[in-house]
Amino acid sequence: MQARTSLPADQLCRRCDPDKFQFATTAELDDLTEAIGQARAVEAVRFGIGMRHDGFNLYVLGPVGAGKHALLRQYLDGRAGTEPQPPDWCYVNNFGDSHKPRALKLPAARGTVLRADMQQLVEELRATIPALFESEEYHNRVEQIDAEFNERQAGAFEELAKDAAVQNIVLLHTQGGFSFAPSKNNEVVEPEEFDKLPDAEREKIAHDIEVLQERMEKIVRQVRQWRKERFAKIRALNREITLFAVGHLIDELKAHYADLPEVQAYFDAVQHDVVDSTDEFRKPHEMPAVGLALAQTQGSEPPDFRRYQVNLLVDHAAPDGAPVVYEPHPSYQNLVGRVEHIAQFGTLLTDFSLIKPGALHQANGGYLLLDAYKLLSQPYAWEGLKRALSTREIRIESLGQMFSLISTVSLEPEPIPLDVKVVLFGDRMLYYLLAEYDPEFAELFKVAADFEDEVERNDVNDLLYARLIGTMGRKAGLRPFERGGVARVIEQCARAIGDAEKLSTHMQGLSDLLREADYWAGEAQRAHVAAEDVERAIEARIHRSDRIRALVQEEIQRGTLMIDTDDAVIGQVNGLSVIQLGDYAFAHPTKITAATRVGDGEMIDIQREVELAGAIHSKGVLTLSAFLAACYASNRPLSLTASLVLEQTYAEVEGDSASVAELCALLSSLADLPLKQSLAVTGSVNQFGQVQAIGAVNEKIEGFFDVCNGRGLSGEQGVLIPAANIKHLMLRRDVVAAAAEGRFHIYPVENIDQAMEILTGVAAGEPDAKGMLPPECVNYRVAARLIEFSLIRQSFAIGAPQKTGTRRKSRKKQ
């Protein structure tokens, strides 16, 4: 057997040499303006922003804290400043149908001017129109119309009175109107005297009165018609006076907006409505209930005049190019806008001035940034956004109105054309789910900008990270970092990603580390942040989160959790389990045991039987059965029943990183060879016995090291890891120091044979040219035991066991 050697200390952690930097502190470095290692994502962003066709909106993929927002804002702010300003949008009253307000489009900054002009117009009309109606000229013309009417009325009744007098009948004025009575010598005949007249005379007088009465009724009807004519003339006069007041004011406004036909048409409608509403300007204190409620609520113009105001929905008065809007709470109404109501006497009231804009209005003509998870969490917000992008218009419609949940009369504002580039931020899983289950997603978000989680670690990127540290520190007002501190931060970035050859691009984590290191530098009263401050920040962060880890370690040291770190035991090995608590992960050893006996090839995973195993863990255990059958029983039944269990585990176990340890325990039980308990094992195994890489290798090594260190390092303890994980090693300094002194060992293994040789101290054994294994090697003992199981099983079936040679099928070594 060729002894396996442990890894040298310089392979356990790739240090960053501070002496390779040519600066003393980051204050000497220029700011970093580009994103490190995000060339693919930046190219996608530039393409998506530059592509102006429909549907080429962006979905930015990447983990939270990767700096996606900062990069997009930096790029968009620079680009948007060079783009033309989008137009202003206003809502104005629709005088033909007040429930359907009109939308007006104006060049940037002219919406504010229009709103001020209309306010000024109303103020001038409120002052001018009452003054004109109080003028002497107006009163003279009204008196002339009244005199003409009175003259015609009086003339008609005088003529009737004369004709009646000829017939000895007098026209009398009473409280109820007019009446006729017989007369004699110009005096009314009393009823008693009238009754004494001859019948023929009385009949004649009654006939004459009847004829006169008919004439009077005709005159009364004429008077009513003349009164209508009088009212019409006065109304025409009022319109003439009002038109005189408003006409030249409207003409002046039209001259200022001659280039905007829609605004010209609006002015015409305003003029027509003002002329039709003369009495409201003459008596502004008389307001209907709706107007009074709105005026009291908002402390503004009475509503009869508010209808001439302009609701400036989007104002681009500031010359800052295209808008870049981030909506932190993308609810349906915050996206598409809303129509507000006020309650008055149990009734909900509204008008066009209560229309409020949404993020789509604010970003129209520019860029809208949204968090995908928050968007999908809001009811109907995702559907509202898709509808707006598909129809290319913003239609304000309340959810209650959409689903007929309210019966109040609401507004139907005219939709506004939409031209916006939407950028969604989200993780990869959400992107793939949307692409799979929402057919409209691919049509509306055709550009994916995928941010890298890590970048290559080399001298060039190390210097870029140094500049990044300096840039972030200056923006946050932190102390400059010494080059030793920069080197320690770079090492921690590699540790954070779990790869000695990579650096993490998690900008939020980096920013937090810099701030914490700056704090400890301040506590030490240093002008610059040193490596000691970064180390203290890392240790303090771990200390704040490792209460559970400390409890687990304590229970192991007290023997509550049974972990052996010396001697050798058959069918027992130390596996390594990882616990993730928020953003903090730690590992601890777990005892794995195996038991074997004669059977029919069944592999019992006790965790799976009691439903405490995830799918990946169960896959790893089933792989062991395939390995045994392929390597030791290719030409005979696998007459084995084996059981495996992770002892003292009371929650679900997931992952296949214990499969190497489980296989070692299984082979130890079959070969009747004890395994060294001073060693822990991690790794995944395939059907051919090759050891595959696993995650969290640093945490697993350190978890077993802490147990051994707590009991005292003997020089025999260590961890077996997959050889493929060597490049991921970024171990703590105390672990590296112990390894350098020979008190702790890290053994890389490529296949299960190498693992068994280290754990047992016995050669695994290679088949010779005839396929025969050397006696007493691990594989010989395993094969012999499986043949023994097969013969025992056959003896139960046919009576007598048969002898056979001990062979093992050759397999490729990795």
Image (tube, grey):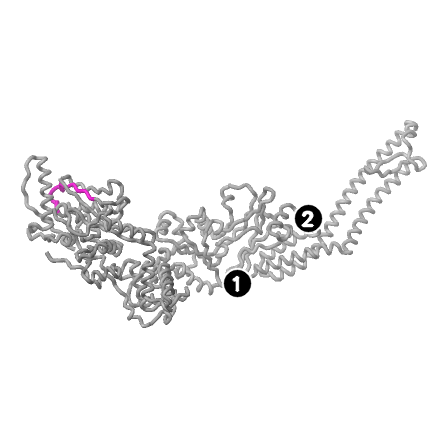
In this orientation, which residue lies closer to the viewer: 4 or 105?
4
CB within 8 Å, label 1 to label 2: no
| Visible residue check, residue 721 | no
Magenta stretch contains residue 93 = no
Horizontal side, residue 713 vs residue 412: left or right:
left
For image coordinates 27% across by 41% down, the residue present is 611
Q: Residues within 10 Å of mark 1 (few under 14, many from 20)?
A: few
Name the residue: 65% across, 57% down.
121
Q: Quadrant of the C terminus?
A: bottom left
Classify 10 Å Cα crowding around label 2: few (below 14), some (14-19), many (20 and above): some
- State the mark number for residue 482: none
Residue 274 % position (x, y): 66, 53
Mark 2: which amino acid? Glu
Residue type of the residue flagged with mark 1: Ala
* Residue 643 falls inside the magenta stretch: yes
Which residues fall within the magenta stretch? Answer: 632-644
Can you identify the residue that label 1 sits on? 318
Vertical placement of 405 versus 278: above or below? above
Looking at the image, residue 362 sits to the left or right of residue 176; the answer is left
Alpha carbons under labels 1 and 2: distance apart: 40 Å
Please provide percent x and percent y for residue 746: 20, 58
| Residue 286 disc label | 2
Give the answer, above or below, for where 177 lies relative to 14: above
Decide if residue 465 is on the left or right side of residue 764: right
Earlier in the chain: of badge 1 and badge 2, it is 2
Tag 2 secondary structure: loop
